[in-house]
């Protein structure tokens, strides 16, 4: 656990309160409690003060006071992160800085295909604003109704459309950032070409608030799709799924926006525990793919192209069964199966989770090797493999043996093996030149793992950047950087 040398003085806290005014701070335990608990319940922190600035100027002044007094700051968006990066430590000596009041869309430029938004904007609201302007903002994740764009960018969020549009960092043209000394880096330029030295914005994308606080961003927009096609497919095995992806990308002119692999174990949990779900296919199969394609042409050519690609895959034995959504409602039902996996798994007892990535061509080998390895380590363990395999990201979760009680000592004993099982899986990932965190970040939970798997020179460079930009170590200390 991170330690704090001293608690913030009453004088420094009063100075911060005066900056944001009565609406911008609280110490009420009931108001603070939800923001002090990490999404998965693994961490519950304390804070000396919850502050909600309403402008970049207020953020800058709060940070300046914190820098002057040596008070640590924990930036927080929608508090939907899964690694504890936005949760204060238990010592209670930090100021929790929420960006929730900074939720204005400052500008939309349809002809430049850009939108300038403040950090506290909820992702779903940005998607709607883009749609209202006949444009698409493609970042899409399960928490989009709650998560905020500042947190998305600070964690370099992924989601279901990375295959087509890239990670969060690929959707940013400019940033406004409050630095650890309170100065403001003003970089809100909507340029696609700017070759004037270091690309400074990249320092803060994925840094989880350890180098500064993102307060606004210029985001890329795209043409709004006119035709969307969704298919739920049974495939022979994960290797067939990867070959199928290549066929569909080629056959549709690279129109694939999402390609999700789902094991029967995962689907079975959804069908057992999520009301209103049903198996889309007549017979059960061991592996499935949910694929979505999008096109700016509304002439119906996309469906024809997808059907031709699937017919060829069926002939080649890659697909065992298939159904195409005939309506938006059917597409939504298919996506509900995929989106409900994590919720359904909660009903199956303890779960040890891995958010990893390997080269797309290695996905099938990874799933096979990791499944064998964890089953050898913990007899009866149940691998639950699913995720965005179109970009190499597998959520390789493992549920406790089904024969064990799901509460009390058996649950505690299973979860106590978290680090052991992590090491088994992550060693395989490392051997395949993969990543131990594909889209969830490092936060607090994976700092030790990062130190183990990153090369010494990478760790040294990260630490050098941290010391250079944040010499007093006030910005989200104890997170990300070993």
Image: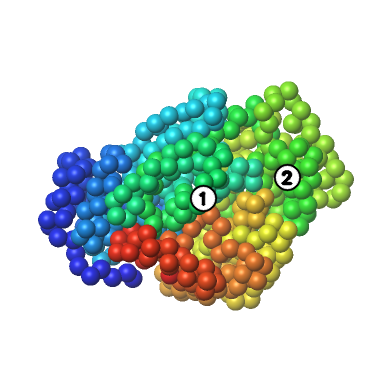
The tag on residue 321 is none
**Which quadrant is the C terminus positioned in?**
bottom left
Please name whichever residue, 389 or 237, is drawn nearer the observer in this view of the structure: 389
Residue under label 2? 233
Residue under label 1? 197
Say which element carries label 2: strand
Residue at left 23%, top 62%? Answer: 70
Please name whichever residue, 118 or 366, is drawn nearer the observer in this view of the structure: 118
Q: Which residue lies furthest to the left in this view?
A: 11
Please name whichever residue, 357 or 208, is drawn nearer the observer in this view of the structure: 208
Q: Residue furthest front?
A: 196
**Could one spot residue 40 in this view of the protein?**
no
In the picture, measured across the screen, residue 481 lies left or right of residue 13, that is right
Residue at left 61%, top 56%? Answer: 393
Could you give the CA–CA distance between mark 2 and mark 1, rounded to whole angstroms? 47 Å
In the picture, measured across the screen, residue 172 lies left or right of residue 470, that is right
Residue at left 34%, top 46%? Answer: 184
Disc nearer the start of the sequence (2/1) = 1
Residue at left 33%, top 64%? Answer: 471
Please name whichever residue, 163 or 318, is drawn nearer the observer in this view of the structure: 163
Q: Residue furthest right?
A: 315
């Amino acid at each position: 656990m991170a330690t704090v040398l001293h608690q913030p003085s009453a004088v420094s806290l009063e100075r911060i309160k005066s900056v944001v005014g009565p609406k911008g701070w609280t110490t009420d335990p009931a108001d603070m409690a939800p923001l002090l608990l990490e999404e998965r319940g693994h961490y519950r922190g304390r804070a000396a003060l919850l502050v909600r600035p309403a402008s970049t100027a207020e953020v800058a002044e709060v940070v300046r006071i914190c820098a002057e007094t040596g008070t640590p700051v924990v930036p927080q968006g929608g508090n939907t992160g899964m690694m504890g990066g936005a949760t204060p430590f238990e010592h209670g000596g930090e100021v929790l800085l929420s960006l929730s009041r900074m939720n204005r869309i400052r500008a939309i430029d349809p002809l430049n295909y850009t939108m300038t938004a403040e950090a506290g904007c909820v992702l779903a609201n940005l998607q709607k604003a883009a749609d209202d302007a006949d444009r698409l903002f493609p970042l899409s994740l399960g928490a989009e109704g709650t998560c905020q764009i500042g947190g998305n960018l600070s964690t370099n969020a992924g989601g279901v459309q990375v295959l087509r549009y890239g990670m969060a960092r690929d959707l940013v043209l400019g940033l406004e950032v409050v630095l650890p000394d309170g100065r403001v880096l003003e970089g809100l330029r909507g340029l696609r070409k700017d070759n004037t030295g270091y690309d400074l914005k990249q320092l803060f994308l994925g840094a989880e608030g350890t180098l500064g606080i993102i307060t606004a961003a210029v985001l890329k927009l795209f043409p709004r799709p006119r035709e969307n096609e969704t298919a739920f497919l049974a495939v022979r095995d994960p290797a067939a799924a990867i070959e199928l992806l290549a066929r569909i990308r080629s056959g549709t002119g690279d129109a694939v926006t999402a390609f999700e692999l789902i094991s029967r174990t995962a689907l079975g949990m959804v069908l057992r525990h999520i009301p209103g779900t049903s198996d889309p296919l007549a017979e059960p199969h061991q592996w499935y793919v949910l694929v979505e394609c999008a096109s700016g042409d509304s002439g119906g050519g996309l469906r024809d192209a997808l059907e031709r690609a699937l017919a060829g895959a069926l002939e080649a034995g890659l697909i065992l069964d298939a159904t195409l959504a005939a309506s938006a409602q059917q597409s939504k039902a298919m996506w509900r199966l995929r989106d409900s996996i994590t919720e359904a798994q909660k009903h199956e007892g303890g779960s040890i989770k891995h958010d990893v990535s390997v080269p797309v061509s290695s996905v099938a080998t990874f799933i096979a090797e990791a499944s064998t390895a964890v089953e050898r380590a913990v007899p009866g363990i149940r691998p639950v493999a699913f995720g965005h395999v179109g970009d190499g990201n597998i959520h390789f979760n493992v549920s406790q043996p089904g024969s064990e009680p799901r509460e009390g000592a058996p649950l505690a004993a299973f979860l106590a093996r978290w680090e052991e099982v992590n090491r088994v899986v992550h060693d395989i990932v490392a051997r395949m030149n993969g990543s131990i965190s594909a889209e969830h970040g490092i936060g607090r939970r994976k700092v030790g793992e990062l130190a183990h798997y990153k090369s010494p020179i990478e760790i040294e460079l990260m630490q050098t950047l941290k010391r250079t930009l944040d010499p007093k170590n006030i910005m989200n200390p104890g997170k990300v950087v070993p």
